[in-house]
Amino acid sequence: MPNKTLRPNYPLLPMTDPTPPIPVPSSESAQSTDSGHSRWRGPPPDPLAGTGLYRGVMWRRIFAYMADVVILAAILTGAWMAAVTAGIATLGLLWPLLWAAIACIPFAYHTLLIGGARSATWGMRLFDIEVRDWEGGRPNLLQAAAMTAIFYISVGLTAWLILAIAPFNNYHRTLHDFVTRLVVVRAPPRLAAPSVLTP
């Protein structure tokens, strides 16, 4: 008679992950996570809801523009020196074209950076703000170009007085923001690179 090995009849248990998920507060995830396309859906969050998206945005925009002026001054100085050199080398034949190209540099600077992947000029990045459309997405180049053009035209015609409307609305928007359906908000925090541990 063959020997039968009796095996204990253990109940089958469902396999579960031993590490439970870490809950993330919805209010923080809506602000700090950014897929690169949209930070919210529909109209932007109410500034009075305490989301932190608009904290210090108005004064940050002022200092960001000052930083952009310094950066543009350096770029224009280099472009002017290159234009003078090229103009002399061509006996002045290229000067009209070069001066027109230099005049377009501020417009191209704001348009390409605001309509780019980071939705912010270098000055804006320095002060942790960015531009978003009214539904939370990143502005395209057409919106960025319109925003830049309206900004330069409006401040030129009103001697900067048009910007005084920013403190009188909850989103701190200016005329070029309203016309292009854009809003400036705090940039989401970016993950820092892991540090290298040395023994």
Image: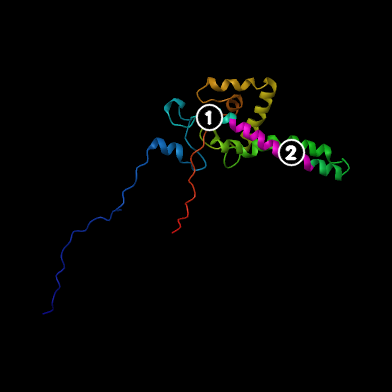
Where is residue 149 drawn, in percent x and y? 67, 30
* Left or right, residue 183 beside residue 98: left
Q: Position of residue 124 (x, y in %)?
A: 58, 35
Residue labelled with disc 1:
57
Residue 76 counted in the magenta span = yes
Label 2 belongs to which residue? 77
Farthest front residue?
199
Three-letter amino acid code at the position of disc 2 = Thr
Q: Main secondary structure of the magenta part?
A: helix
Viewer-closest of 110 and 68: 68
Task: Indicate whether 5 appears above or below 80.
Answer: below
**SS at mark 1 in the image:** helix
Badge 1 crowding class, 10 Å Cα cut-off, few under 14, some 14 to 19, many 20 or more, is many
Q: Residue at x 31, y 48 (%)?
A: 20
Front position among marks 2 and 1: 2
On the question of residue 81 being in view, the answer is yes
Q: Which residues are magenta?
A: 63-82
Q: Quadrant of the C terminus?
A: bottom left
Whether residues under marks 2 and 1 lie with C-beta atoms below 8 angstroms apart, the answer is no
